[in-house]
Amino acid sequence: MSLSILILAAGSSSRMRGGDKLMEGVDGQPLILRQALMALATGLPVSIALPSDRPARDAALDGLAVTRLTVPDAAEGMAASIRMGAVALPVNTGLLLLLADLPEIMTQDLATLVAAWRVTPTMILRAASATGTPGHPVIFPSWVTPELTALVGDTGARDVLRRHNTRTRLIALPGNRATTDLDTPEDWAAWRAGKRF
């Protein structure tokens, strides 16, 4: 079995009141670029789900060896992006779903998940905070792919995870890396206040 990464970057950033959280600077570069470079550092194939109306996101990825998937129905929610990425998967390929708006996830966190997948490639592997709160990224084995291609709505793969909770293993990552998700200008300001830039 093999594994591919899908970065979910087709969201509207609606709570940013006109801003785009994926273009916010993290570690000196736009967040979407940081996430793409981090994913590529794993050596796995990387696809990025993008909306059709955010050209700056697309431009930030220029020159990178990633597959860009333009999601025409991105307004439907996260399911549209996951469906598109799952449909494009080769046979017997697992999918590592990486949310583009997790600014604390590091390359070594992805490596930790991939290493766990190599040991248990038939389990769903979900990153968690150091205290055990479930978060992201999530690795879905290939047997889950038919369910991912049938997703609808804006709850992502939440129902899939609920159905298969006995086949899901949590992988603790340091601190709150797996759960820090910044959606508003206030979230970003508060996070930056405690970060070094």
Image: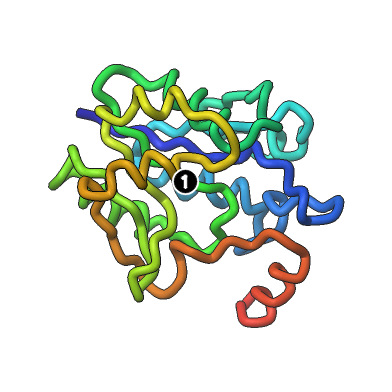
Name the residue beneath numbered marker 1.
98
Residue at 40% in and 56% down: 107
Quadrant of the image for the C terminus?
A: bottom right
**Quarter holding residue 127:** bottom left
Residue at 28% in and 58% down: 170
Helix, strand or loop under label 1: strand
Is residue 148 among the parts visible in the rendering? yes
Q: Position of residue 44 (x, y in %)?
A: 35, 36
Judge whether 181 appears above or below 143 on screen.
Answer: below
Q: Nearer the viewer, residue 10 or 153?
A: 153
Outermost residue on the left side: it is: 119
Instruction: Say left or right for 166 vs 54.
Output: left
The amino acid type found where label 1 is placed reads: Leu
Query: How many numbered discs?
Result: 1
**Quarter holding residue 180:** bottom right
Q: Where is residue 92 in the image (x, y as percent from the top left)?
A: 24, 23
Is residue 65 among the parts visible in the rendering? no
Residue at 51% in and 23% down: 84
